[in-house]
Image: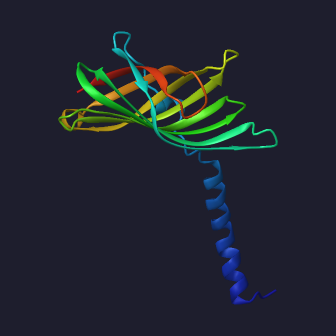
Amino acid sequence: MILPQRSVRLLLVAPLLLGLVAVGCTQDPTPSSSDSVAKISPDAPTVSVEMPAVRTTVYKVGADKEKTYGQNQLVGEAVVLGKPAKVEILGNVEYLNGTGPFYGFLTVSWKDGSSLGFNIQGSAELLESGSTALKADMRFIGGTGEYESASATGKFTGSRGAAVGTPITIKLTLDVKK
């Protein structure tokens, strides 16, 4: 049987396209747990940071408005690694009845232009009291200034007393090696 030239090309290209689609379907865009969270030294410093929301875009959907999704920009100040610093979170949330994942970025910056940037992956749990418990692992992206060649790991735990968009308080632990 002789196939038209167009059919032959399709027969040759189709397995290649299917292979590419299959590879794309099996790739997880999030880093594996071994890549994303390194061990933090037990003597790494922890600071408390109160972070009010400076910008919030949140939507509630569902029959009972039980689903919440959106983003927040939270900014606070604390003494981090021995110097006054600004701590900023650009976070995205997707909650069901107040509980669920959040992700985004956390940046610590100092007046001299130095900074540390992290990807954050966390979870929020709405408690019976109405407050929310927060915890997140942080993957170091990179730094500037005195932290340009640094390596770092981090994590935080925290809480929010009311709905998404109200201030959070976190305990931020950073293990930084220059």
Residue 141 position by quadrant: top left
Could you tell whether 67 is left or right of 168 in the image? right
Q: Residue at x 50, y 19 (%)?
A: 157
Residue 110 position by quadrant: top left
* Closer to us: 1 or 59: 59
Residue 2 position by quadrant: bottom right
Q: Residue at x 69, y 88 (%)?
A: 5
**Quarter of the figure that contains the N terminus:** bottom right
Colour scheme = rainbow
* Closer to us: 90 or 41: 90
Q: In the displayed structure, would residue 19 be above or below residue 103?
A: below
> Measured from the top left, where is residue 149 in percent x and y?
23, 35
Could you tell whether 167 is left or right of 22 in the image? left
Q: Residue furthest top?
A: 43
**Quarter of the figure that contains the C terminus:** top left
* Closer to us: 54 or 117: 54
* Closer to us: 136 or 25: 136
> Measured from the top left, where is residue 127 in percent x and y?
67, 18
> Measured from the top left, where is residue 123 in percent x and y?
59, 28
> Measured from the top left, where is residue 49 in percent x and y?
39, 22
Q: Residue at x 19, y 33 (%)?
A: 146
Q: Residue at x 22, y 35 (%)?
A: 114
